Structures are given as C-alpha cells and as structure tokens.
Image (cartoon, grey):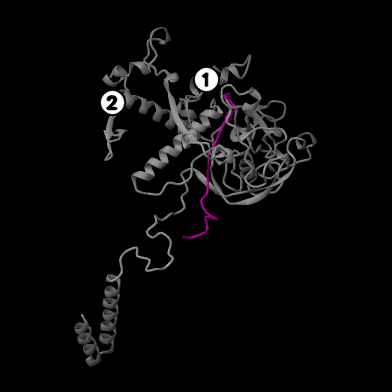
Amino acid sequence: MISHFTTISKTINTQKNPMKRLALGYAVLIMLALVSSCSKKAGDPQGQLTGVMERPKWDHINPMGMVYIPSGTFYAGPGDEDMNNSLQQRPQAQSIQGFYMDATEITNNEYRQFVNYVRDSIAHTMLDHFIEDDKGQKKIDWAIPIDWSPGSEDVSALGEMYYSGNDKFWGREELDVNKLKFAREWYDWKSAARKDMRENSRGGFIKKEETHIYPDTLCWVHDFSYSYNEPMTRNYFWHPSFDDYPVVGVNWTQANAFCSWRTKLWNEYQQSIGETMGEEFRLPFEHEWEYAARGGKESAPYPWGGPYVRNRKGCLLANFKPGRGNYPEDGGFYTVRADSYHPNDFGLYNMAGNVAEWTSTAFYENSQAFNHDMNADIRYDAGGETPITMKRKVIRGGSWKDVAYYIQTGTRNWEYQDTAKAYIGFRTALTFLGRSIDDKY
C-alpha cells in the first residue's frame, strides 16, 4: 500500500496539467480515509464517552387529523366576571407541555373503524384465522378476508355473534352489538410510583378491563322525555349522511378504550416497519383541553376571542342553544359536521359547542386548591363498588343543547364516567416528545 501511494505521489509531481494533479490528490485523500476506517471497528468508542452507538433515529410525527399545540402558560379559570363559577374554578397560572390534539371531535366514521376492528378480531378468532411468528406466537391473520354478506359460510359459522330467536327483527341477520367487547391493558403509574408500593410485583400495577364498545344509540331517546328523536337513534351512528359528525353515546370508559385501541393500531404498524414507538393516545386532561381551546388568547371567554357569540354580520360562531331555544339558528339542529365553523388559532374546530367532550380529569369542586401548576392532572380510576360521587369526570366545551354560558372556555362541568349522552363526545391527545417541534435533530 505504501509503495502504491509513493507511485501516485510521484505521478502527481510529474503531471504538468494542474487539474489532473488536483484530481489525483483527491484520490490519495479518499484512499487514506478508507485505510483509516478499516482499522476501526463499527461502534468502537475508542476509549471515548460517546453514549450508546447506533441508537434508532427519532423524527417528529404528526398523526393524521391532529394539530400540534406548543408548550405554554395561561391563566385557567373564568374568562368573564362570574362570581359563582370562580368559587369552583379560581384563576390559576398553568404551564402545559406541548402536545398533539385531534383537530375535530372523533367522528362516527372514525369510531366505526374501532367497532369494525373489534368485530373482525372476534370473527377471526372464531374462524381460527391465525398465523405463527418466528417466536411461535399466534397472531390474527388479517390478510384472510371475511365474507359478511347474508347467508355466506362465514356468517353461518359466526352464528354466536348474531341475534337469534326472539331477538331477531323481521328475520334479519344482525350483529348482536353486546358481543362487541375490547380487552385493554394499562399501567397504573401513579400507584407504582408510591414509595410504599415499590416492592410489589409489577403485575399488580397492570390493569385489565373488558369494555362494551358499541355506542348507546338509544341515548337520543332516553336523554329527552316527550321529544321525538327516534330517527336519530336509528340512523345517527350508521347512516352515511352522519359519517363526519361527532360520535355520541360513548361513555368515559369507552372513550378510553378507543384511545387504547388507537395506540395499539399505531404501535403495531410502527413495529412492522421497524420504527420506534412513541407515546400513547389518551384523553386530554382538563387544563390541557382549556389551554388548547383558548388558542393562545389570554382570558378570552370563547375560542374565537369574544366577548360575543356572533360576528359582525350577526352570524353565530358555534353550534349551541341560542336565545331561548332557537336550535336551527346556528345552522344545525342537533350536532353538525365536526369541521364546521372556523377553527381557533391552534387549528381546532368546535372547541365551543357541537358536543361536550370527555377529559381524563376527575371532578372535584375545589381542585384548584390542591392541584399542581404544571400539567395539572387529577385522576381517579373508579371501580364498580366506588361511591357514585367518585365517578364524576370533567367534561368541557358545552354542546348543541347548551346555552352560551356552557360553551365558554373557562366553564367546568361534569358527568358520571359510566353515562353516555347524546351531547357528549371526545377527542384524543398525544404528548409531544421533545422541547419544540421546531427543534431539528
């Protein structure tokens, strides 16, 4: 190798053309670099503090349908002079870490993807559609199609999933929605972090729950006495005309099940392409929701600022109950499309009105007296035997049936976690990993 470099060097010195001399000089440098690299093993720190080498790269993601909300600080609480509300929501400075949030409420069609996933997973299991991976573990083979047409062999084999006997209506083959259950798991980090619990087995902090996931379509009837809303019960969740409308009839537990499924769906895809998995989809906590609703406008009573619910032309800016009950005046009667009206400055639609939205936060009247001023999060997983007052969860944003007071950014409200209503939906959030989306790695 040395004699070869010597030959090249002599050649460079004897060349008369300066361009050729330059080209040959570059050739020498490249060959020297190759020789140097061959003497060093890949990943060898050579005695230096380098950190673990060959770590997977992480690039910021922006899931479909979500918008990025930057970190910031705001004053939580009433955006207007409201003495009664200030007793249970005193103004308080809150700092919020950056996160992603769905630009719209979760729609009927998006939730239907969840329902169909659960339906298909049960059917594949009953039909023994499995494959084994390299480790000998059985997994559902999603590539095998299921024939859901009436009278097909698959439908005959899946008889247990359908209504039978007196439950049949006009002899139709219809799925028994009570059979649609989703088994989810989550880790109880708060209990695991307690000093007196750290010696316990990890399995004691892994929570498991099986949830009925089909929306309560009868909410349109039982929520309103002496009111004809049966067409909404029959059509709202399944008719194509309502595909882009917010899903309702979903309780707090079902909303959490949806978040777990969305996380599972995303992580399984990331694993399949060899990418690093990120955070979990979840319900936003109360102050996170309020910060996003304000859209960067300090002390604004509404997402668009305010103080009025109409623009200069007299047009209403949200879907709620105007005046003394002129429901259609705002352009809707019940709910409207999830992307109706103008978004706030963060790009979020219907943070006021349309449907109220579940948060992860447990409701306490005086929570501002003891919560933290950084990502304030008060959670309580109430079980079946828990007193009913401990099952209250914060809902925000007001709905199509509420007066203007309830659609203000600072108004708190609550509902029982096992209750489904025709005016409550949800949207999901995802914590941002890093300081700012503007950071380049």
Is 135 or 79 nearer to us in this picture?
Answer: 135
Q: Please report whichever mark, 2 or 1, sits nearer to the chain's N-terminal start.
A: 2
Residue 120 sits in quarter: top left
> How many other residues sit within 10 Å of disc 1, few (<14), some (14-19) or many (≥20)?
some
Picture residue at 61% right of the left edge, 19% below the top? 223
Please state the horizontal and vertical placement of residue 127, each as a whole percent of the image. 29, 24
Whether residue 144 appears in this view of the structure is: no
Q: Is residue 197 left or right of residue 115?
A: right
Is 387 or 303 nearer to us in this picture?
Answer: 387
Whether residue 332 appears in this view of the structure is: yes
Q: Magenta stretch: residue 419 in it?
A: yes
Residue 342 sits in quarter: top right
Alpha carbons under labels 2 and 1: distance apart: 35 Å
Please state the horizontal and vertical placement of residue 400, each as a whole percent of the image. 62, 30
Main SS, magenta region, reads loop
Residue 128's disc is 2
